[in-house]
Amino acid sequence: MSSLKPKKALLVVDVQNDFCPGGALGIPNGHQIIPAINRYIKAFQKENWPVFVTRDWHPQFTRHFKKFGGAWPEHCIEGSPGAQFHPDLEFPKEALVMSKGMDM
């Protein structure tokens, strides 16, 4: 059995409008971390290390939402402005985007 060689990668998690101020589940001052995230992204790009990005991505009618029996208010509905990444986030076009919360 061969062993895995350690590598570096950056994982950016759910930097979406609905989790920033003014969003459905906005975190006060949450947007203030974005410049630091962008610095990490640039540093990882410079070293050719991979950047992975996750997004909360729900269908409009999902059991996650309160009105369908879930615990959460509507947020990050696929294709909505709230589900979009924050406009100041500068991840590379080759970043792998992973969607979650899709009721699969």
Image (cartoon, rainbow, N blue to C red):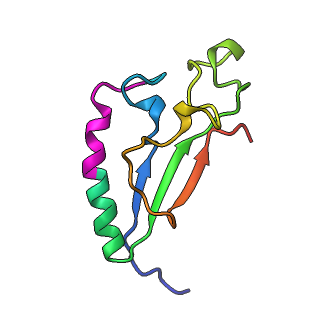
What residue sits 42% from the left and 81% below the top? 5
**Residue visible at 31% across and 52% down in the picture:** 37
**Is 35 included in the stretch rendered in magenta?**
yes
Horizontal and vertical percent position of residue 40 = 29, 60
Q: Where 7 sits versus 39, above or below?
A: below
User: Where does residue 42 sit, x and y in percent of width and height?
Assistant: 31, 65
Give the residue displayed 36% in from the left and 71% down from the top. 45
Closer to the camera in the image, 61 or 21: 21
103 relative position to 96: left or right: right
**First to last magenta residue range:** 26-36
Which residue corresponds to the image point at 64% horizontal and 37% vertical from the top-left?
79
The part of the image, by quadrant, that contains residue 57 is top right
* Residue situated in front as seen by the camera: 30 or 80: 80
User: Horizontal placement of 64 versus 104: left or right?
Assistant: left
Of 16 and 65, nearer the camera is 16
Could you tell me which quadrant the C terminus lies in? top right
Residue 8 locus on image (x, y percent): 37, 71
Compared to residue 73, the image places residue 102 above or below, namely below
Number of numbered labels in the structure image: 0
Image quadrant where residue 71 sits:
top right
Q: Position of residue 60 (x, y in %)?
A: 70, 27
Q: Residue furthest bottom?
A: 2
Residue lying furthest top: 67
Residue 55 among those drawn in magenta:
no
